[in-house]
């Protein structure tokens, strides 16, 4: 075995050890948040259920079709909250692992992208909770046939809202995706601008696929995606000129 192969093997082992350590830190961060939130699991679920409870007709309530549901479902939501709160730290661990292989101007770009992607993900969740949920639950409750009592199972409700949280959280990442596509040379700002009509149609198709089968929630997802796409184009113009300057600075420092 040559000296070069020994160095390569040692480097691979060190990377695997670092990856293991960062994965352990990530898991521990989620567990820490869960331990903190677990005592408030019932309160958190009451907050989550508030938009539906406000829309239900008087006398209707949520139910549990499984004996263990009232105990386990709030803890499932507490764990989901713990994971969501740990997202910035998880993204930081990913960045710290890949940072040594990036150029200086790329490292300067990563932190703003991580901060903006985390913020947009949370913004999407808040938009779903405060804007979308009251509208769609009011719509669903008012369209129930005469004589049908709307009594949603707590576990089914949790799965429904988690799906919407994820859909809106991911959809609000459009500006980050737009900037990255332009920065990596996959497309150009002018090229995306010309494809605007197709992107608007794709936004409504995305809303149809990721939201319940009603026009309200589909539109409430599609319109923010379109607006955020336009914001991504604006940001890409700024970052493009900023990146060129950073690259020139890096070249000057190398010289």
Image: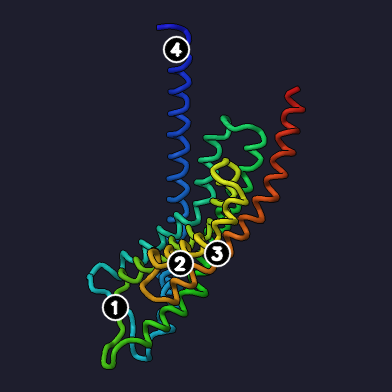
The residue singled out by tag 4 in the image is 6
- What's the mark number on residue 63? 1
The residue singled out by tag 2 in the image is 204
Q: Callout 3: few (<14), some (14-19), or many (20+) C-alpha neighbours within 10 Å?
A: many
| Dot 4 or dot 1, earlier in sequence | 4
- Residue 222 picture location, percent across and down: 49, 67
- Residue 231 picture location, percent across and down: 63, 59
The Cα atoms of the two marked residues, 2 and 4, are separated by: 54 Å
| Dot 1 or dot 2, earlier in sequence | 1
The Cα atoms of the two marked residues, 2 and 3, are separated by: 9 Å
Quarter of the rendering occupied by the N terminus: top left
Q: Is residue 8 left or right of residue 110?
A: left
The residue singled out by tag 3 in the image is 226
The Cα atoms of the two marked residues, 3 and 1, are separated by: 37 Å
* Mark 4 or mark 1, whichever is nearer to me: 4
| Dot 2 or dot 3, earlier in sequence | 2
- Residue 53 picture location, percent across and down: 40, 81
Q: Are marks 3 and 1 in contact (CB under 8 Å)?
A: no
Element class at badge 4 = helix
Q: Nearer the viewer, residue 249 or 187?
A: 187
Q: Are marks 2 and 4 in contact (CB under 8 Å)?
A: no
From this view, report whether residue 98 is shown above or below residue 122. above
The Cα atoms of the two marked residues, 4 and 3, are separated by: 52 Å
The Cα atoms of the two marked residues, 1 and 2, are separated by: 33 Å
Quarter of the rendering occupied by the C terminus: top right
Element class at badge 3 = helix
| Dot 4 or dot 3, earlier in sequence | 4
């Amino acid at each position: 075995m040559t000296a070069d192969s020994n160095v390569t093997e040692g480097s691979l082992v060190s990377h695997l050890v670092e990856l293991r350590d960062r994965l352990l830190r990530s898991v521990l961060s989620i567990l820490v948040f869960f331990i903190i939130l677990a005592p408030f699991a019932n309160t958190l679920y009451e907050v989550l259920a508030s938009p539906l409870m406000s829309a239900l007709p008087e006398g209707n309530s949520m139910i549990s079709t499984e004996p263990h549901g009232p105990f386990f479902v709030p803890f499932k939501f507490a764990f989901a909250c713990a994971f969501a709160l740990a997202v910035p730290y998880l993204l930081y661990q990913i960045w710290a692992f890949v940072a040594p292989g990036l150029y200086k101007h790329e490292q300067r770009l990563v932190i703003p992208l991580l901060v903006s992607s985390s913020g947009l993900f949370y913004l999407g969740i808040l938009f779903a909770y405060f804007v979308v949920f009251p509208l769609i639950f009011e719509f669903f409750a008012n369209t129930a046939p005469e004589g049908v009592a709307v009594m949603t199972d707590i576990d089914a409700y949790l799965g429904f809202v988690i799906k919407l949280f994820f859909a809106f959280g991911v959809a609000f990442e459009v500006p980050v995706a737009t900037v990255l596509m332009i920065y990596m040379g996959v497309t150009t700002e002018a090229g995306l601008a010309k494809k605007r009509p197709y992107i608007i149609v794709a936004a409504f198709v995305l809303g149809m696929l990721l939201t319940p089968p009603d026009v309200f929630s589909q539109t409430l997802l599609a319109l923010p995606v379109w607006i955020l796409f336009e914001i991504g184009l604006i940001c890409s113009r700024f970052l493009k000129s900023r990146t060129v300057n950073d690259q020139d600075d890096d070249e000057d420092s190398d010289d």
